[in-house]
Amino acid sequence: MQIRNDLMNLFFPNRCPGCNKILTASEDLCEACSEHILLTHDSYCQRCGKEACSCKRTSFAYDRAVICCRYADEAVSAIVRMKTSENTNMAHFAARILAERIRLSLNFGTFDCVMPVPMHPSRQRERGYNQAALIGKEIARLLSLPYREDVLYKERSVISQHSLGAKDRKKNVSGFGIRDIRLDGLRILLCDDVLTTGATLDRCAALLKQNGAAAVVAAAAASTPPKDYRKSEETAPLPPEGGTP
Ligand SMILES: [Zn+2]
Ligand SMILES: [Zn+2]
């Protein structure tokens, strides 16, 4: 098996999804990339999952959030590569960090199961897989938890509301739906690739709670940075302009 892996790595080298550098067969991300994009567990709000906390402005149906990286710089290429199945190392990297944070932090408690934010089947066929599922399955494996895709689903984004009854209309909001499965008292870990406003995770968490879930924790590979993040990186202080008024 080891020889086979070594040979595979010779012909199809394992590359860093952030910078494309060649890695050893067991690495997910190079050290420079992971150091640069990793968010420390206390650098984001563990309620909303944002570096610039938005809890005062918005309330979320999920109870807590656990995040791996800042969605900027190398994390963007790593996540794009994961989405296009060119390189899925990022899913393994994120799952490992997220599982570790969940295991070590007392904030999250225990879980009954792991679920991904669903993707529409036709889109999944195009792509080959759902990137949120890739992360979710790996977290479930690492934490020895059941993994479930039978509860939430994604409708076609252009489903006509006219064709639905009042109850289903409500369910169809934003294209996410939930099957008639009771989740009474369950504590659920809900996974996605990128948390932007938190709206997607919020909608899915609200559906889970509608069916009785006691708690939903959102786990995302990355969270978008505060608005001024790029600006502050780009606009490094200018050198003093000698003499000009
Ligand atoms: Zn790298
Ligand atoms: Zn917050």
Image (cartoon, rainbow, N blue to C red):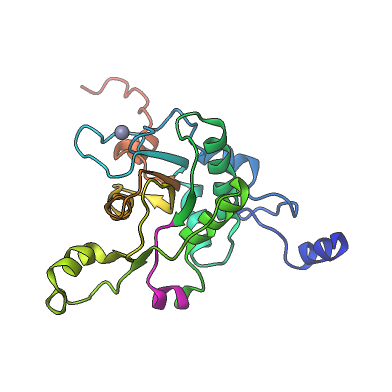
Quarter holding the N terminus is bottom right
Q: Is residue 103 left or right of residue 208?
A: right
In this rendering, would 122 be left or right of 174? Answer: right
Please provide the residue range marked out in magenta.
Answer: 116-125
Report the front residue among 11 and 198: 198
Quadrant of image for the C terminus: top left
> Considering only vertical position in the picture, is 104 above or below 67?
above
Q: Quadrant of ligand 2?
A: top left
Q: Quadrant of residue 2?
A: bottom right
Depth order, front residue of 7/128: 128
Q: In x, y percent, where is residue 184?
A: 36, 50
x 73%, y 66%: residue: 12
Image side of residue 130 versus residue 199, left or right: right
Percent position of residue 232, x then y: 35, 34
Q: Is residue 8 visible?
A: yes
Residue depicted at x 34% and y 68%: 154
Residue 80 appearing in the image: no
Whether the magenta-drawn stretch holds residue 119 is answered as yes
Residue 170 percent across, percent down from the top left: 17, 63
